Amino acid sequence: GNSVTQMEGPVTLSEEAFLTINCTYTATGYPSLFWYVQYPGEGLQLLLKATKADDKGSNKGFEATYRKETTSFHLEKGSVQVSDSAVYFCALSARTGTASKLTFGTGTRLQVTL
Amino acid sequence: DSGVTQTPKHLITATGQRVTLRCSPRSGDLSVYWYQQSLDQGLQFLIQYYNGEERAKGNILERFSAQQFPDLHSELNLSSLELGDSALYFCASSKGFDGNTIYFGEGSWLTVV
């Protein structure tokens, strides 16, 4: 079946540090890949997505590249801010016939300090 | 604001009771998904509807049921509630059924006491 593996957190960084959160996946076919973010006490927000190999998704300074050869979709940001503190979820969407569902990783908590 | 509306935002109920969670999808979206987020299970897919028809089922208990109405809103019914059902229940929607871009509501916090 489909699965997503994320690096375990929490990840603690100082403001302006470089961020990488690793994500690898297992899927049949050609999934779409996503990063969602959950700020404290809030719901899930779509951060970025990539729908085919070598696509790069980007938003709010975050970016991730769909790497089919390494089945990875690592999230990066060059300079994190305190306001980026949240839980980040990597996910894939795989279509089966006329249905689809998102499969999520376990989430990685990011804590950014001054 | 994702455009997906969920009610209620919070509810507390006793074991053995039944609750209904409601979801209004984004305007124009035909697919509705339900997910459960709990501390021990993470984010689990429950069920998907597309234009009123059930399309996919995940880890949804037999005590739980859902439906999508002609106006495309959806309800998730949870019955014979147990302490372990305490979780954040998300509704999400997308235009089609291919799941290419799925937007989530803010969730309904259910606490079973």
Image: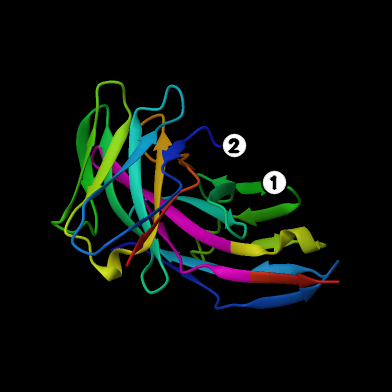
Q: Where is residue A47 in the image (x, y as percent from the top left)?
A: 61, 49
Q: Which quadrant of the structure image shows residue B111?
A: bottom left
In the image, A15: left or right of B27? right
In the image, A59: left or right of A1? right
Measure how far apart labels 1 and 2 are at the Cα level: 16 Å
Question: The disc labelled 2 sits on which kind of residue?
Answer: Asp
Callout 1: residue from which chain? A
Q: Assign the magenta stretch its main secondary structure.
A: strand
Q: Return the residue nearer the eye: B18 or A96.
A: B18
Q: Quadrant of the N terminus of chain A?
A: bottom left
| Tag 1 residue | A59
Question: The disc labelled 1 sits on which kind of residue?
Answer: Asn
Question: Badge 1: few (under 14), some or many (20 or more) residues near its Cα, within 10 Å?
Answer: few
| Tag 2 residue | B1
The verdict on residue A93 being magenta is yes
Callout 2: residue from which chain? B
Q: Position of residue A43 (x, y in %)?
A: 53, 51
Which residues are the magenta region? A88-109
Q: Which quadrant of the structure image shows residue A17?
A: bottom right
Is residue A107 visible from the viewing direction of this image? yes
* Element type at mark 2: loop
The verdict on residue B103 being magenta is no
Residue at screen point 55% across, 59% down: A67
Residue B112 versus residue B1 in the image, above or below: below
* Element type at mark 1: strand
